[in-house]
Amino acid sequence: MIDLDVFSDLICPWCYIGGRRLQRAVGIVTERTGQEFRIRHHAFELNPAMPTVGVDRRTYRSEKFGSWERSRQLDAATVLAGRDEGIAFDYEAITRTPNTRAGHRLIALAEQSAQSSAAMADRLLVAYFSEGQDIGDVDVLARIGKEMGLGDDVAAQLTDPAVETAVAEDEQLAEYIGLRGVPLLIIGDRALNGAVDTDTLVEILQRHPGAGRRRVRERSVLAVTTVPDIESVGVVGGSLGGLFQAVALTELGLDVTVWERSSGRPDDRGAGIVLQPSVAWFLNMFCGVDPDRISVPVTHRQFFSRDGRSHHTLMRQQMISWGALYTSLRDRLDPARYHDGQQVTALASRHDGVDVHLGDTVHSVDLAIIADGSASRHRGLVAPDSAPRYAGYVAYRGVIGEADLTEDLSAVFRDRFSFYDGDRTQFLCYFIPGEFGTTTPGKRRMNWVWYVRADAAGLDRITTDRNGTAHGLSLPPGLIAPRVHDELLYRTRRLLPEPMRELVEHTREPFAQAILDGWVTRMRNDRMLLTGDAAFVVRPHTAASAEKAAADAITLFTALQQVPSLDGALRAWEKNRLAEGMALYRHGVGLGHRLGLGGPATPAAAAGPTG
């Protein structure tokens, strides 16, 4: 009998999916080899401070993820993944997010009663995610316990100190090994993070006969194991997508080289980004950077009407600047690994790797990461005929020093993520870190974005600069043509509420970018991978572009760390990222249409790659 130890929580949908995949893998391996396994559940609370009675799910999830729309987007990704495992998520039936400690006690009670803790955990996940039951309610737990054969006095048994001790010991063990997220599967000396796909689990289980739990306390969740069949990685593109990958893969002990077409570091006038959980986790775990130190908190969302009146809703989020995020990633990377001003001209597959061409120079690597942005020059090597398409509108953007705002105007937006939704337009703004990443009030910057419809001819006019140079899909700061600037100010006076109008008028160097839609059906061609915006280009309403790039890197790090073969690791990575990328793409298109901005998509004009 081989023990498989699983740490999970009962409000984690990926624990539900991962558990079903593990059950299926165990069945396959047992049928093939006759080897028997025992799955043992261990308690982990994602929300240990949750009130005993739980909280309203919509309120809680909206605050945790920044908006209800973002929460539903994450739910949609799990619904798609769950279908393959025979799971029917019914999020509409769930009204409360429960405290899960009593549920973990019920699982521990099942274990102590010589029943399957895994079977009890699965039943509770079904009750919550598929039936909408409140699994923090002791009466509900008592009914489920009786159904699972624990007798009529389950409520009383849940108060047994031995049951609580078992849960506390699990959580102490989780803290000891540095666990920060679930699910986590431990097979002997190997720790597998996330809902690993069934094929990968089958391969691992077959290669680890006799694995038990003998060394679980010696295991660090992020400990690096030998990466199969790979020593060197070339990253094409040194913006955020490429940097996430380079930092993560360097942590695996790989020899990573980054080639970036542009010269020098970009200036720090870049726009703002909503700091999503994956990015915050990456900064903390891979860069040693406290995300709270380089981000600006907001406590409320503020919604304006055309006459300037507003109302608020409680919504805590963190805002970061593109520059602060870029600097944190770039500073983590050895400067000798990053080559700016060097354009990759071609990539060529070999039987055991990829040749990276920079003019007449060729570098051979075991794995090539294509991260050269939405206008990727090399996307077609992996996903032909997948060029992004113009969505029919642009984002005007501006950044203003907080010191340049009047105190009254600054106070209107302080601690707020502010919105105005007009007729087929949207304006939003929030404070971000200032120069050198400072978050000191008075030294921060105000970041604003204004989505405006524009046909192809309008896009060409907006992105042609004051010198008559056409930039294609974007217009850098400081180059807006006088006529376009005058049109922007005229539209501002005619359409925006007073406080937002003042922001635009205070902006010396507005810039612009075309909104694109891009999706792919492949992210891998042998040892070439697409990542970041070189793969899926999602609309900025999702606030998920940076998060998607971080998740691409985290998932690849995990797959290479955990899966015993390179091919298996890359297959698992691609399957995961395609599912989430498509869900984000569809979600962004839906948001654009709801705002009246989703015009007919047209092929995006060619633009220079970023790597």
Image: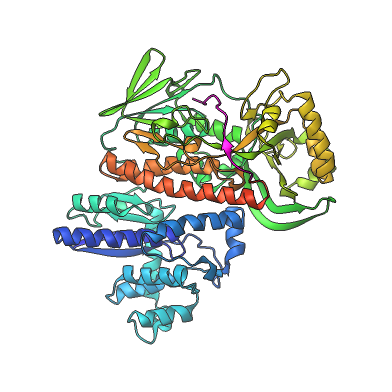
- Residue 549 visible from this viewpoint: yes
What residue is rendered at 81% in x and 30% in y?
486
- Nearer to the camera, 106 or 608: 608
Q: Residue furthest top?
A: 360
- Image quarter for residue 481? top right
**Which quadrant of the rendered structure holds the N terminus?**
bottom left
> Which residue occupies 60% across, 55% down?
69
Residue 349 falls left or right of residue 324: left
Camera-nearest residue between 220 and 611: 611
Is the residue 592 above or below the residue 84 in the image?
above
Over which residues does the magenta segment extend?
599-611
Image position, residue 329 (x, y; %) = 51, 33
Image coordinates for residue 270, horizontal then vertical, percent: 64, 32
Residue drawn at (57%, 60%), measured in percent from left and top?
A: 61
Q: Considering depth in this image, is 410 or 29 the residue closer to the camera?
A: 29
Q: Residue at x 40, y 44 (%)?
A: 555
Could you say where residue 24 lies in the image, as x and y percent from the top left? 28, 61
User: Magenta stretch containing residue 68, yes or no?
Assistant: no
